[in-house]
Amino acid sequence: MSEFIKHLFRLLLLLLSQHFLLYQIPPLHHTAVPVLYFLFSLWLPFQIGRAPLLLLSFITGMLMDFFTKTPGMHAAAMVLIGYLRPFLIALLMPQQGVEFNYREPSAQSMGMVPYISYVAILTLLHHFCLFSIQAFQFGDMSYMWLKTGISWGVSLVLILSIELIFHRKQKFLTNT
Amino acid sequence: MRNLFAFIRRYFILLLFLSLEIYSFYLLFRYNQFHRAAYMDVAGEWTGKLEAKAQQFTLYFSLKKENEALRHRLNILQNQLSQNFQAPDTTAGTLALDTIRIDTLSQFRKYRYREATVVNNSVNLPNNFITLHRGRLQEIEPGMVVIGPSGVVGVVLDVSDNFATVMSMLHRQSRISGRLKKTGEMGRIEWDGADPRIVQMKDISKGTQVKPGDTILTSQYSDFPANLMIGTVQKVIAEKSSNNFLLQVKPATDFSKIQNVFVIENLQRAEQEELENRNKEK
C-alpha cells in the first residue's frame, strides 16, 4: 500500500470514527469528549515540509468542521498543532539523524517517554484551543477548564490504547 | 521591496500559520454568527447522506425502547375501541368515544386488554404452552384469552404471582369456537398434535360452501372477542364417517415467532356463566 493511500485511509477512518462514534457518546458528552481525529497530523512523516504540514492540518480541521457544521473551529486548533509540531519534535529529539531512521513519529521511533510527551503536549494544546473556541461561543470559563482537563485525560488514554491495540509497524530505514 | 520578499521568505511558515489561523477565525465568526447558509448547503448535502446512513444504525439501539412505547400506546388505544363495549340494550344507539377523562362507558365495557411479554414458548410438543411474564399481581386470571399481533394465540391456564401459563392453540385440549367469515358457519378449532403449522376445524356441515383460502374468525360464542383472525383454510377434507368437513386451517399466528401478546379479560363473563350454570341446576 502506498504511503499516500495509507494516510488517506487513516484520515477517513479518524474523521468518521470521530464524528459517528466519539462525538455521539452520550454519558461522556458534557465534560469528557474524547477527540482523536488530530492524530492524523501527529502521525504524518518526519520528512514532510512545514508548509504542507500546516496545509494538511488545516484541511483535516476543515473536513472535521464539515461534519460538525462549525466552520473554522477544528481548523483553528489543527493549524495550531500543525505549526507547533516541528518545534516539539526538534525539542524532544535533539540527537541528530534519528528522525531519518524511521518514517513517522511513534513510540518505537522516538522512544516511549519522548513520544508520550509529544502526544500529551499536542493533545493538550489542541483540546485547549478547541474548547476555548467552543467556550467562546457558549460561555463559562471554569467549565471550559474542567472540560479541557477531563477530555485531555480521556483522549490520552484512548490514544495510548489505540497505539497498543493497532500496532503501527515501523520500518527501519537504512541508507544502503 | 527586496527586503519585503526576504522578510516573507524568512518568516514564510509563521506567516502561513498566522494567515491560516486568521482564516479559520474568520470562518468561525462569519459563518457561525451570521449566515451559515452557503457552507451549510454543501456540508449538509455531503454529510447528510452519511448521517442518514449512520442514523439507520443508531436507530437499532433504541428499537427495543421504541417498541415498548409503541406497544404501550397500542394497549391504551385497544382499550378504547368501541367494540370492547357491549350494552345489553343495543337500541341505545352506537357507542361513541368522547374526550371526557372519566370513563362513563365503564359499565358497558366487556373486554379489557393487557399487554404481556412471552418469556417461554414451545411448538413442537403435542401439548404446547406459552409462558407470559405477567401474573396474578399484574391482574391476570385463569380463563382470560390471549391474542398476538396477527391473531388468536390461546387461553390462560394457570397464574403465579408474576407469570402466567397459556394453553396455546397448539394444545390437544384446546377448543376455540370459530366462524367462517364468508358463510357464518360455526365450528370448533382443535389441534391433532401433529403439525404446528396446521390446526383443524370441525363441525362444518358438508352443505357449506367452503374453499381453500377462506378466512376463519372467532365467533361471538367464544371467550375471545368476536371477529378476531384465527387463520385461513388450507385444505377441505370430507369426513367419510360423518356429515361434516374437516378443514385444515393455517393459523394466522406464527407460534414459533411470538414475542408480545395481549391478554384479554371478558368483564361480563362471570355474570353470563353464573346465569348459565343456574339454568343447568334447574
Image (cartoon, rainbow, N blue to C red):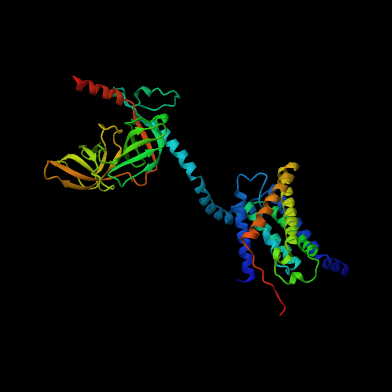
Q: Is residue A122 above or below residue B4?
A: above
In which quadrant of the rendered view does residue B8 lie? bottom right
| Residue A76 seen anywhere in this rendered image of the structure | no
The residue under the point 28% across, 47% down is B196
Front residue of this view, candidates A42 and A114? A114
Please state the horizontal and vertical placement of residue A82, each as a whole percent of the image.
Answer: 74, 61
Marker count (numbered): 0
Left or right placement of residue A88 versus residue B51 in this view: right
Asked whether the viewer can see residue A98, the reply is: yes
Quick check: B223 left or right of A120? left
In the depicted structure, whether residue A156 falls above or below residue B167 = below
- Whether residue B6 sits left or right of residue B161 in the image: it is right
> Residue reaching furthest top?
B282
Look at the image and tell me in which quarter the C terminus of chain A lies: bottom right
List x then y, in percent, for residue B275. Answer: 25, 21
Position in image of residue B113 (x %, y %): 38, 32
Quadrant holding the N terminus of chain A: bottom right
In the figure, B40 relative to B100: above or below?
A: below
In the foreground, B144 or B206: B144
Q: Nearer the viewer, residue B196 or B272?
A: B196
Residue B243 image position (x, y, % from top left): 12, 41
In the image, A7: left or right of B154? Answer: right
Which residue is at a point 83% across and 65% down the rendered structure image? B11
Looking at this view, is B243 or B47 the one in front?
A: B243
